[in-house]
């Protein structure tokens, strides 16, 4: 978490010829917020199809379901349930408000903490402690390298290896941290991005029907923004730091096999898709068809949904991400959200380095969002 002091320091530094900031992205719209280190957040549920890979952390105010062979490179935090299919893996920890269920051969590198029950399938492997508010069940042949604590009952299968202590009827079991609903925060971020202006209008009925190229700047639509099947949107950075802002009134659609291509885009650049959903009758959703590829951060009022083999990734080593203020996120099988080993916002914000003076767009955006964060924390 970035402190108020750090935000104030950044706001002071933006008036100087050079600025200390992340090498991964010039504008982190979630800087200083509870979502600063999340690749995915949904106020509704999150589901991922088989063999999907997420480079960073995943958080839902309700439930998270990972199908077989899904790999999450960070932590998984859910307000209600977490479910991992067979051979799914989490490189961080799992925190679940109610139940955590792991299929056979699943792996979790760190701890599991659930408000009620933890159920682990056969031959799974857990690198840290396991804690369940009521019961913990571990399938045969599994490995638990830490302690196992249950509020009432533990059931341990044959040939289970436990590296720490096994405790039932434990007074040591504490509830997992609450996952806060972030609708208000995401809405404020979207309003901040919208306040950056309309810039150049992209005509919904014609833009994206052919291959397109855009330089850094602010773009908007009074309706939807769509890239047609197999078409490309090339973002040309001209080799200098820049920001692409897309303020979209209705919905965002990348049809099957459409792609966002980066040309001469520096690692200090940013891409923000702001699906506001303020057009009458709009739910403000984003969809990617099978094989579609998007880059940057997607903020939506409504849901985010992709077909199989889709991609959402940041620039350079940044994970990028998707955030739904009011609804769910669904990914089709074999999708990728942030390359493996990518950096989430919190880690990126700590990798301070000297970079050339940012563009006026970045200065305005960072200043606006920093002031919002400070004001909200003072009110709290």
Image (tube, grey):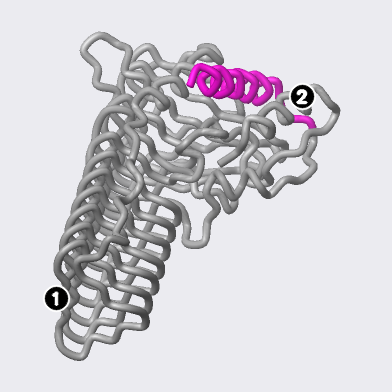
Tell me if I can see residue 120 in this picture: yes
Residue occupying the point 35% across, 46% down: 177
| Residue 126 falls inside the magenta stretch | no
| SS assignment at label 1 | strand
Along the line of sight, the residue nearer the viewer: 94 or 162? 162
Residue 228, given in percent of the width and then of the height, sits at 33, 34
- Which comes sooner in the sequence, label 2 or label 1? 2
Residue occupying the point 56% across, 29% down: 244
Residue 197, given in percent of the width and then of the height, sits at 54, 12
Question: Magenta part mainly helix, strand or loop?
Answer: helix
Indicate which disc residue 155 carries: 1
Residue 97, given in percent of the width and then of the height, sits at 25, 48
| Residue 364 falls inside the magenta stretch | yes
Residue 98, given in percent of the width and then of the height, sits at 20, 50
240 to 127, vertically: above or below: above
Question: How many badges with numbers are in the image?
Answer: 2
Q: In the figure, is residue 26 to the left or right of 137?
A: right
Tell me if I can see residue 332 in this picture: no
Residue occupying the point 20% across, 63% down: 118
219 to 334, vertically: above or below: above
Residue 366, picture quadrant: top right
Residue 251, picture quadrant: top left
Along the line of sight, the residue nearer the viewer: 41 or 302? 41
Quadrant (top left, top right, bottom left, bottom right) of the N terminus:
top right
Mark 2 highlights which residue?
Answer: 12
| SS assignment at label 2 | helix
Give, as a single range, the part of the protein colored magenta: 357-380
Callout 1: few (<14), some (14-19), or many (20+) C-alpha neighbours within 10 Å?
Answer: few
């Amino acid at each position: 978490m970035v402190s108020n002091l750090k935000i104030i320091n950044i706001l002071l530094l933006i008036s100087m010829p050079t600025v200390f900031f992340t090498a991964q992205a010039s504008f982190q719209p979630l800087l200083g917020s509870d979502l600063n280190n999340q690749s995915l957040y949904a106020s509704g549920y999150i589901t991922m199809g088989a063999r999907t890979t997420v480079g960073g952390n995943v958080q839902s105010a309700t439930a998270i379901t990972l199908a077989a062979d899904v790999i999450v490179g960070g932590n998984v935090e859910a307000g209600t349930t977490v479910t991992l299919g067979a051979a799914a893996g989490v490189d961080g920890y799992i925190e679940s408000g109610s139940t955590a269920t792991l299929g056979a051969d699943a792996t979790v590198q760190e701890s599991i903490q659930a408000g009620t029950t933890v159920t682990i399938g056969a031959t799974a492997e857990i690198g840290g402690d396991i804690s369940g508010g009521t019961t913990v069940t571990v399938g045969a042949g599994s490995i638990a390298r830490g302690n196992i604590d249950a509020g009432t009952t533990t059931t341990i299968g044959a040939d289970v290896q436990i590296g720490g202590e096994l405790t039932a009827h434990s007074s040591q079991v504490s509830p997992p941290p609450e996952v806060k609903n972030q609708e208000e925060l995401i809405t404020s971020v979207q309003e901040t991005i919208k306040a950056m202006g309309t810039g150049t209008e992209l005509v919904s009925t014609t833009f994206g029907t052919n291959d397109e190229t855009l330089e850094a700047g602010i773009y908007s639509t009074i309706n939807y923004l769509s890239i047609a099947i197999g078409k490309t949107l090339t973002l040309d950075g001209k080799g200098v730091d820049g920001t692409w802002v897309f303020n979209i009134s209705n919905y965002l659609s990348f049809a099957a096999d459409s792609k966002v291509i980066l040309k001469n885009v520096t690692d200090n650049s940013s891409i923000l898709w702001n699906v506001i959903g303020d057009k009458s009758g709009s739910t403000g959703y984003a969809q990617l068809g099978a094989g579609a590829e998007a880059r940057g951060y997607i903020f939506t009022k409504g849901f985010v949904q992709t077909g199989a083999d889709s991609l959402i990734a940041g620039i350079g080593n940044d994970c990028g991400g998707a955030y739904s203020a009011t609804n769910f996120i669904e990914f089709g099988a074999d999708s990728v959200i942030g390359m493996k080993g990518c950096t989430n916002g919190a880690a990126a914000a700590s990798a301070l380095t000297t970079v050339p003076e940012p563009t006026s767009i970045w200065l305005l955006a960072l200043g606006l969002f920093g002031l919002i964060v400070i004001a909200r924390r003072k009110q709290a």
